[in-house]
Image: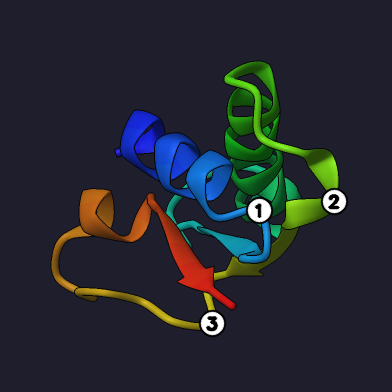
Amino acid sequence: KVDELADYLKANPDKKVEVRGHCDPSESEVKILGKRRAFMIKKELVDRGVNDSQISYVGIETAEPKDKSKPASNQRVTFVIK
């Protein structure tokens, strides 16, 4: 997915993406883990040639769980194209 997003952003320099990092309450360092996940994806996108100004990132942390009964599904990154 990161490669697909990088290709899309490079082909559409007028588009921006917000990378949103999520985590599960069961994880350690819950206050910063989502933001760290999002930052690492931003770094990967820049490493693939995407302009840094096209990418913002934020830590959603535990605010938007995908599935409360499946902790692993909450350990994720989502993208919002703007």
Residue in front for this viewpoint, 36 or 1: 1
- Number of marks: 3
Residue where numbered disc 1 is placed: 13
Q: Residue at x 14, y 70 (%)?
A: 69
Q: Residues within 10 Å of mark 2 (few under 14, many from 20)?
A: few
Residue at the spot 47% in from the left edge and 63% down from the top edge: 79
The answer for how far apart the CA atoms under marks 3 and 1 are is: 30 Å
Where residue 20 sits: x, y (%)? Answer: 57, 63
The residue under the point 19% across, 74% down is: 67
* Image position, residue 53 (x, y; %): 85, 51
Mark 1, mark 2: which one is toward the viewer? Answer: 1
Label 3 element class: loop
Quadrant of the frame with the N terminus: top left
For residue 17, side relative to residue 4 (left or right): right
The local secondary structure at tag 1 comes to loop
First in residue order: circle 1 vs circle 2: 1
> In the displayed structure, would residue 43 be above or below residue 68?
above
Q: Are marks 3 and 1 in contact (CB under 8 Å)?
A: no
Q: Is residue 49 above or below residue 6?
A: above
> What amino acid does circle 1 point to?
Pro
Q: Are marks 1 and 2 in contact (CB under 8 Å)?
A: no
Give the residue type at disc 3.
Ala
- Expressed as whole percent of the image width and height from the top left, the position of residue 27 reads 49, 46
Q: Which residue is mark 2?
A: 53
Q: Secondary structure at mark 2?
A: helix
In-image side of 64 versus 9 (left or right): left
Residue lying furthest left? 69
Locate residue 78, reporting x and y percent.
42, 61
